[in-house]
Image: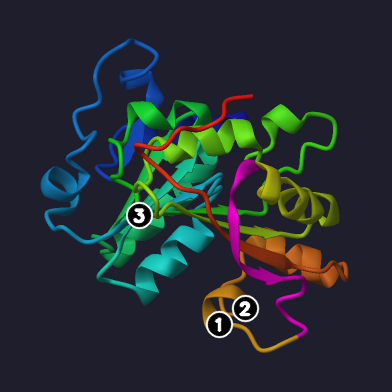
Amino acid sequence: MAKHKLARFAENETFGNLFQHTNYDRQGIPFPLKGQWGRDYFHNDNPIVVELGCGKGDYTLALARRNPDVNYIGVDRKGARLWRGCKDALEEGLTNVAFLRISIDNIGYYFASGEVSEIWVTFPDPQPKSERRRLVSPRFVGFYRGVLPAGGGILNLKTDSRMLYAYVLETAPAEGWQVLENVEDVYAQPCADILTGIQTFYEKMWLAEGRTISYVRLAVGGAGEASKQK
């Protein structure tokens, strides 16, 4: 396994669709695509949608295949996971996909205010013992608001965790987040294909175990608005 990881890390260095933290925020070097993703990487002005904790990029790639007029960026801190997504995107010739290997709390180093139109968080670790580490906590949403459009920042959560689902719904009113859509069980009622037609490796596993898959779409505001940091 160690040899496979080392080989993947080496191949990651050759991928033109992968940008790694070791070259930027860890060394204090300004990231050249910040504020210029559309112009300098995608070469268009299409909306940019980010998936956080994307793993192998299953959801990112599926969205990109379905929506060629939208640019997608998958974010994860594990290089061995990202290798699969990067390789598949290149082999399929998907030009509307890129990947970032960074810590999610550093997202502000890589995107300018308002540069990201929408964020997806799919099956994150619910972090039952640490609210601060939850990717949908007020602390993390504060980071996201710095890169989302003012007044129109959208955050999508898809989860198998009953605790995390309840937590988001309980937290939203106090934080001023607007619940735009709330589906307790996406497979128990008619839903948009984007929710049921894309199944990641983990989602398939959770479904096989009989877990309920929930979805919440939130308007959390964005750049230019005061955000709470906890």
Work out whether residue 200 or residue 175 is closer to the camera in this orientation and state it. 175
Query: Looking at the picture, how far across and down is residue 204, in whole percent?
Result: 72, 68
Q: Name the residue: 35% across, 58% down.
A: 89
From this view, report whether residue 223 is shown above or below residue 130: below
**Cα distance in 3D space between marks 3 and 1:** 20 Å
Question: Is the C-beta separation of discs 2 and 1 under 8 Å?
Answer: yes
**Cα distance in 3D space between marks 2 and 1:** 7 Å
* Magenta residue span: 175-188
From the image, tell me which residue sits under label 2.
196
Work out whether residue 213 or residue 201 is closer to the camera in this orientation and state it. 213
Q: Does residue 177 belong to the magenta stretch?
A: yes
Q: Which mark is residue 55?
A: none
Question: Is the C-beta separation of discs 3 and 1 under 8 Å?
Answer: no
Q: Nearer the viewer, mark 3 or mark 1?
A: 3
Q: How is the image coloured?
A: rainbow
Could you tell which of marks 3 and 2 lies nearer the N-terminus? Answer: 3
Q: Is residue 78 visible?
A: no
From the image, tell me which residue sits under label 1.
192
The three-letter amino acid code for the residue at tag 1 is: Ala
From the image, tell me which residue sits under label 3.
117
Query: Looking at the picture, how far across and down is residue 187, in whole percent?
Result: 73, 81
Q: Residues within 10 Å of mark 2 (few under 14, many from 20)?
A: few
Q: Is residue 213 visible?
A: yes
